[in-house]
């Protein structure tokens, strides 16, 4: 890779979308854990 190559960073909206998907995934995993805990208590 040469020093003159352009940066290989994704555009701003793609980074925002990736961050949103990561948060959604964490929220879904947390919701599943809570759901399993509630089902386990019954």
Image (cartoon, rainbow, N blue to C red):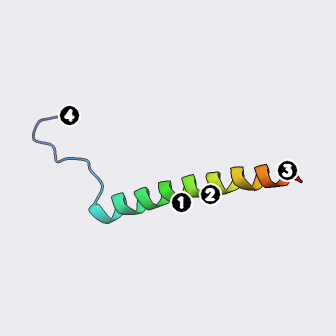
Whole-number angstrom distance, CA of label 4 to CA of label 2? 39 Å
Residue 40 marker? none
First reached walking from the N terminus: tag 4 or tag 1:
4
In the picture, the disc for residue 1 is 4
Callouts 1 and 2 close, C-beta under 8 Å? yes
Q: Earlier in the sequence, mark 3 or mark 1?
A: 1
Residue at the (28%, 60%) spot, across then down: 11
Query: What is the distance, in whole Å, between disc 3 and disc 4 at their CAs?
Result: 56 Å
Q: Which residue is mark 1?
A: 24
Task: Say few, some or many: other residues with alpha carbon within 10 Å of mark 1 (under 14 / 14 to 19 / 20 or more).
Answer: few
Q: Quadrant of the C terminus?
A: bottom right
In whole angstroms, how far apart are the C-alphas of marks 4 and 1? 35 Å
- Please give left or right for residue 39 compared with residue 31 in the image: right
Q: Nearer the viewer, mark 3 or mark 4?
A: 3
- Asked if the residue at tag 1 contacts the one at tag 3, i.e. Cβ–Cβ closer than 8 Å, the answer is no
Discs 3/1, front:
3
Which of the two discs, 3 and 2, sits closer to the camera?
Answer: 3
In front here: 1 or 21? 21
Seen as rendered, the residue at the extreme left is: 4
Among all residues in the image, which is located at the extreme top? 1
Q: Which residue is mark 3?
A: 41
Residue 40 versus residue 4: which sits nearer the camera? Answer: 40
Residue 2 picture location, percent across and down = 14, 35
- Residue 28's label in the rendered image is 2
Mark with earlier residue (3, 4): 4
Side (left or right) of 20 relative to 10: right
**Mark with earlier residue (3, 2):** 2
Q: Is residue 8 left or right of residue 31?
A: left
Q: Mark 1 and mark 2: span between their CA atoms?
A: 6 Å
Marks 4 and 2: which is nearer the front?
Answer: 2
């Amino acid at each position: 890779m040469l020093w003159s190559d352009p940066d290989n960073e994704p555009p701003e909206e793609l980074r925002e979308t990736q961050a949103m998907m990561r948060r959604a995934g964490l929220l879904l995993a947390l919701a599943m854990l809570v759901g399993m805990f509630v089902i386990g208590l019954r």
